[in-house]
Image: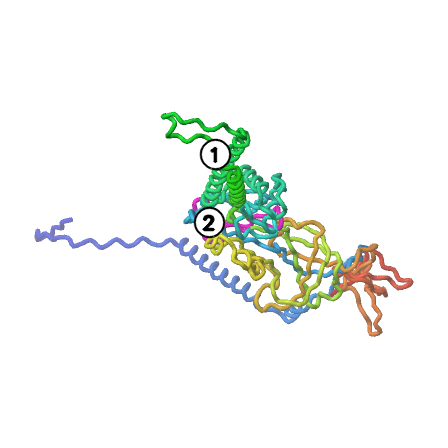
């Protein structure tokens, strides 16, 4: 705005003063004050509660730290059969494991590869069954106690030939008129029939023996022709006239040819020559028989696996078709399973042969009953079977066993064997430095199932036969006073306690048989004190 003064001077207006800030409401200030008071009161209340939880009166502290009131632990009186027993652990394992190491059947096989597998782990192997084929050569199982340590062929003799004859006869291939333990034509025919039944070519002794037969046969054929010619000449001489007419002068065309009469030998020379040739024929026929006796179908040692008992169980197959063979290809067990219990020295008292036992595989619930066969001397060695290796590099290199016996044999011809280390898993005392135990040999009432192989099972030795049911209480319920008298404390439903004198009897499974004293009563179902 412009102001005009009387002097007509114009005065310019100055800047306008700022507007005053809006005034605060009185109601808002009041609400803020109330909120602050409430917050402070809440903090004070929380602090009071926390302090109250930390501060305890002496009475409260005593109540919290005082021991709980006394209470009774009771158990019922039962009526049952008590059989004294001893519980321990036992190990189930095969008594013998056979590790099969294939070898080459001939020098023509330069490397070993799996060309066929006939079994897998867990399979049952029967007599005559094909196990595998290695580099085209079959490997089959036959029953017999003597391991295969040489090729069996015509002319062979011995107990291994006898077990071959028995095994083939069990499969329906008899050895004819051959003597027991002598490989003759009948055994050769049985071998041929067996291989044909497997669908395999029949192995033979080879070209060398066949050539010897062929050579001997040619000599015999030549001898027979000579003998036949001399025999014919002798017959002709015998039928000729005794006084022949004098010879006629020869015609010019006949002078160059000798007459039949001039070709004939004197009778004495003919007989001598015939006798000589007949002797040669007999000698050559004998040579032919000898050559034929060692020629023909054979069983290479690399083809057969003799096991003392069949059927057997395959426990491992270490290879696949097409893979090279290095070491053990197959592992088998035969003859069932063995179980050995392990009793601590303090448990062995009173355990004797003939006692009944119970074996329990806790993981499968399988139960097998048996008897104690023998209690051995204390030992720390883990229970385990033997491992016998059949075959091996020595047999492949030589093709036959050394003079001492079978390949890998110990003195006396027995196959080399070693403990089956690590075969038994989870045995209680199979670690180095473990305490000694008494091995208990168990005879099962029935064959142990294959599912128990390698198991650590519970062994219960029943020291007495089960009798009639008896009144029994937990062992903890028995009290003995200074005079040696025993009693139990009975508790009725109202909680009243009374002492019942008893006489104790047999103890088993944590229970003890009791007989109340005359005039006292203790019945099944009553509650007795076992602790406080």
Q: Eyeballing the image, is 202 above or below 397? A: above
Q: Position of residue 496 (x, y in %)?
A: 82, 62
Residue at mark 2: 104
Q: Please tell me whether mark 1 sits on a helix, a strand or a loop.
A: loop
Numbered range of the magenta stretch:
305-331
Q: Which label's residue is closer to the chain start, 1 or 2?
A: 2
Residue 318: say if magenta: yes
On screen, residue 173 versus residue 216, left or right, reads right
Residue at mark 1: 264
Residue at the right extreme of this rendering:
519
Q: Please tell me whether mark 2 sits on a helix, a strand or a loop.
A: loop
Q: Which colour scheme appears in the figure?
A: rainbow
Q: Position of residue 24 (x, y in %)?
A: 35, 54
The one nearer the camera, 249 or 148, is 249
The one nearer the camera, 143 or 458, is 143
The one nearer the camera, 418 or 347, is 418
The picture quadrant where one finds residue 35 is bottom left
The one nearer the camera, 293 or 473, is 293
């Amino acid at each position: 705005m412009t102001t005009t003064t009387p002097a007509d001077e114009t005065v310019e207006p100055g800047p306008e003063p700022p507007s005053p800030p809006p005034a605060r409401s009185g109601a808002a200030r009041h609400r803020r004050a109330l909120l602050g008071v409430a917050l402070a009161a809440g903090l004070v209340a929380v602090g009071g509660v926390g302090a109250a939880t930390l501060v305890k009166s002496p009475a409260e502290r005593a109540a919290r730290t005082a021991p709980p009131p006394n209470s009774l632990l009771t158990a019922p009186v039962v009526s049952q059969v008590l059989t004294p027993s001893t519980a321990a652990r036992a190990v189930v394992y095969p008594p013998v494991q056979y590790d099969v190491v294939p070898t080459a059947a001939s020098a023509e096989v330069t490397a070993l590869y799996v060309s066929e597998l006939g079994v897998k782990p867990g399979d049952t192997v029967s007599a005559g069954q094909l196990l595998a084929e290695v580099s085209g050569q079959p490997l089959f199982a036959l029953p017999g106690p003597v391991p295969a340590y040489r090729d069996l062929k015509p002319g062979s003799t011995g107990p291994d030939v006898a077990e071959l004859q028995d095994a083939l006869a069990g499969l329906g291939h008899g050895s004819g008129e051959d003597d027991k333990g002598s490989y003759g034509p009948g055994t050769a025919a049985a071998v041929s029939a067996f291989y044909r039944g497997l669908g395999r070519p029949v192995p033979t002794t080879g070209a060398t023996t066949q050539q010897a037969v062929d050579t001997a046969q040619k000599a015999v054929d030549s001898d027979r022709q000579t003998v036949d010619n001399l025999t014919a000449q002798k017959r002709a001489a015998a039928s000729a006239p005794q006084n022949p007419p004098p010879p006629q002068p020869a015609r010019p065309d006949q002078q160059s040819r000798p007459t039949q009469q001039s070709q004939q030998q004197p009778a004495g020379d003919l007989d001598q020559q015939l006798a000589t040739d007949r002797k040669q024929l007999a000698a050559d026929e004998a040579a032919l028989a000898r050559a034929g006796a060692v020629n023909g179908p054979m069983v290479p040692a690399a083809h057969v696996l003799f096991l003392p008992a069949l059927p057997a169980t395959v426990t491992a197959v270490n290879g696949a078709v097409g893979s090279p063979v290095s070491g053990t290809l197959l592992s088998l067990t035969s003859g069932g399973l063995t179980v050995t219990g392990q009793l601590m020295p303090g448990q062995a008292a009173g355990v004797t042969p003939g006692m009944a036992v119970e074996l329990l595989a806790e993981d499968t619930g399988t139960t097998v009953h048996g008897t104690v066969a023998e209690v051995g001397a204390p030992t720390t060695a883990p229970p385990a079977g033997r491992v016998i290796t059949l075959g091996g590099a020595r047999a492949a290199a030589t093709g036959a066993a050394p003079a001492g016996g079978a390949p890998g044999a110990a003195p006396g011809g027995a196959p080399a064997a070693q403990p089956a280390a690590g075969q038994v898993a989870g045995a209680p005392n199979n670690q180095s430095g473990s305490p000694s135990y008494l091995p208990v040999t168990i005879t099962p009432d029935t064959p142990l199932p294959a599912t128990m192989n390698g198991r650590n099972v519970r062994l219960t030795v029943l020291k007495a036969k089960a009798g009639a049911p008896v009144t029994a209480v937990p062992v903890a319920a028995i009290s003995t006073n200074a005079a040696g008298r025993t009693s139990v404390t009975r508790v009725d439903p109202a909680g009243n306690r009374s002492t019942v004198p008893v006489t104790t009897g047999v103890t088993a499974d944590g229970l003890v048989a009791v007989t109340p004293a005359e005039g006292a009563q203790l019945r099944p179902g009553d509650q007795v004190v076992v602790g406080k």
